[in-house]
Image (tube, grey):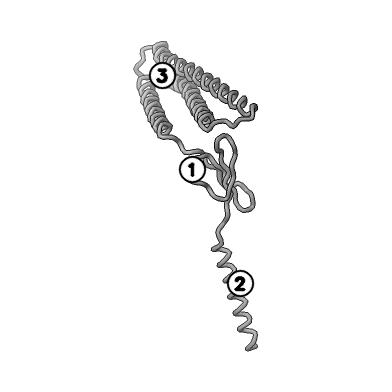
Amino acid sequence: MTKTLPLLACTLLIAATGSTLAQQAPTKKLYCWNENGARVCGDALPAHAVDNARTEFNSSGRAVSQLPRALTDEERAAAAAQAKLDQDARAAAEVAARRDRAMAESYATEEDLRRAFGERIALMDETIKASRLGVEGRRQSLVSLLGRAGETELSGKPVPKKASDNILTQHELLLRQRSMLAAQLAERELIDEDLEAALVRYHEMKKD
């Protein structure tokens, strides 16, 4: 019995030490990023590639994270400006909706109510039309850039980094414009719903 205790203690100590070392062992990662039109991978990320889009893999080869490239100063400024425009547009739309609901009771006739909403609908329809043209123009630009990049690769030459970055930028802008168009289409549907609700309140008011 007296000989078993030290052996048990040693076993526990070895197990604990092994667990601690396993916890302290660094977790290796593999990084893959695009550089000058080519995909590069390594177990360390060089300083010149920290702003590139990249995928990180664990020691088992499973992708654990995917990071987009860092935005340029111009792109960050454009994104901030667009966010401010979107916020202002939403605020204006909310004010307009409250105003329309509040004025519903003061329209002399149903035709006056429909005319007021009609002006708002016409303005939104024009905005949607312009956004659709913008989306199509951005899409055509991206298709053209991709075509030139494909021709460069087929000729056996790498796609220049500037061209690759431009493709990514155009793609991001296209996605942003599509998102804006989707928001405008949703708002257009809300106008119809607001009109129907205003008509209901208008007729209820006339009954009284």
In the structure shown, which secondary structural element does the residue marked by tag 3 occupy?
helix
The numbered mark at residue 86 is none
Name the residue carrying label 2.
Answer: 15
In the rendered image, residue 69, in percent from the top left (x then y), is placed at 50, 38
Q: Is residue 63 above or below residue 152?
A: below
Q: Position of residue 191 (x, y in %)?
A: 45, 21
- Depth check: give the residue in front, 22 or 159: 159
Q: Could you tell me the amino acid type at mark 3?
A: Tyr
Q: Under tag 1, what secondary structure?
A: helix
Q: Is residue 151 left or right of residue 179?
A: right
Q: Which residue is mark 1?
A: 48
Give the residue at mark 3: 202
Seen at 41% across and 19% down, the residue is: 202
> Residues at badges 2 and 1 in contact (C-beta under 8 Å)?
no
Secondary element at tag 2: helix
Q: Residues within 10 Å of mark 3 (few under 14, many from 20)?
A: many
Mark 2 and mark 1: Cα distance apart in space: 43 Å
**Sequence-first tag of 2 and 3:** 2
